[in-house]
Image: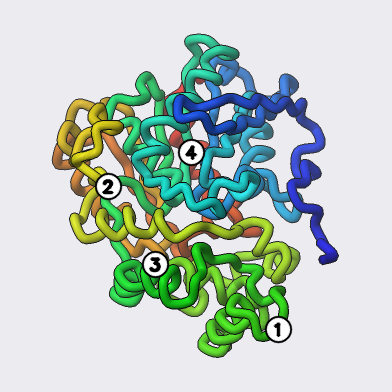
Amino acid sequence: MEHRIPRFTLDGVRDAEVTVHPFATEDELGLQLTRFRRDHTPAQGAQDDVVLLVHGLTSSSDMFIMPEHTNLVRFLHDSGFGDVWALDFRMSNRFPYTLETRRHTLDDIAQYDHPAALREIRRHVGARRIHVVAHCLGSVTFHMSLFSGAVREIASVVANSVALTPRVHPWARLKLTLGPALLEYGTGLSYLDPRFRDAPPLTRRWLLARAVSYFHPECREAACHMQSFMWGSGRPAMYRHRNLARRTHVHERLADLNGACDLHYYRHVRKMVAAGRAVKSDVGDPRYAALPDDYLVNAADVDTPILFLTGDRNEVFTDSNIVCHRVLSEAAPGRHELRILPGYGHIDPLIGANAHRDVFPHILDFLKRHSGR
């Protein structure tokens, strides 16, 4: 397949020093951090602050370094935050883990991935302040780590779309309830992939992609249709079309940015949606005894300030962050903040063509107020 933008390209951060830092988790998975440094930042005073970027399920660190517009790494560098790290954890489409039948849950990521990533960063930056910008289930799992005490000493967190109170539309709830079993046992498919349209004609993958596209006449991009089927409820579900650059909203580019994933994570999300909050997948499993059954049980004790971001057209996690802000503000009045982004959806606040004008300034303002500047 010809790619108009090369897969895993670093063209979006050409003026930075890039180093790759592989590390391993305690359950023996190899993961990766990528560090983007620019020492010649125009603003001064942020040298003691490090920013960690965390992607969501089916995406990767690539969502933060897109060359087709001003990406978040470049924006932070230009704004004086010259030491930015991007995490690729086990949900990343840069790894094979989301296509293997390992049956991981969000608890695995909270207990193993984020703590190991923070240890690796601390090995290089010492006691400097670390701020986190997290998206989707990367945000959910990072908050699970933070509120369970698995990670500590985080200066601030920006949570896009969802955090500890996942909420979805009724159609998405139905898909979460019935989808994994129907697909695994009814069709024999153990994963979903936006590239299913490119499968050989008349195969199960090809037929599913054609059927999904039949119900999505809003555009001609099959990967866009499949992503709406995989996540949320809407035409489209993941973003507003008008917020994406033309070079982004093409089949191959969308499939590169948001790839394939297995179905077992949906089961844990379904349990959280039913509970109305982040809860453990299996309370009887001794491997996760260190994690709380309810991740909000000690919410008042977490003193890290959080900025909750959400688009007012969020068709994936609806008003999840509005609810989470309200819940945590009741536990710790005045500690956290909420920004509702007009005209934005689920992922376009971070990958939108004009996010550097509409969204990133909110992130920057929050980081500055909680940094050493």
Q: Is residue 27 left or right of residue 53?
A: left
- The reply to whether discs 1 and 3 touch (Cβ–Cβ < 8 Å) is no
Structural distance between the alpha carbons of marks 2 and 4: 25 Å
Residue picked out by circle 2: 281
Could you tell me which secondary element the residue under label 1 belongs to? loop
Estimate the spatial distance between the alpha carbons at disc 2 and disc 1, rounded to whole Å: 38 Å
Q: Residue at x 21, y 34 (%)?
A: 292
Outermost top residue: 126
Q: Which mark is residue 158?
A: none
Mark 3 near mark 4, Cβ–Cβ under 8 Å?
no
Which residue in the protein does label 3 denote?
A: 180
Q: Residue under circle 1?
A: 201
Residue at image mark 4? 133
Among the two numbered marks 4 and 1 on one chain, the one whose residue lies closer to the N terminus: 4
Q: Nearer the viewer, residue 371 or 61?
A: 61
Q: Nearer the viewer, residue 355 or 197?
A: 197
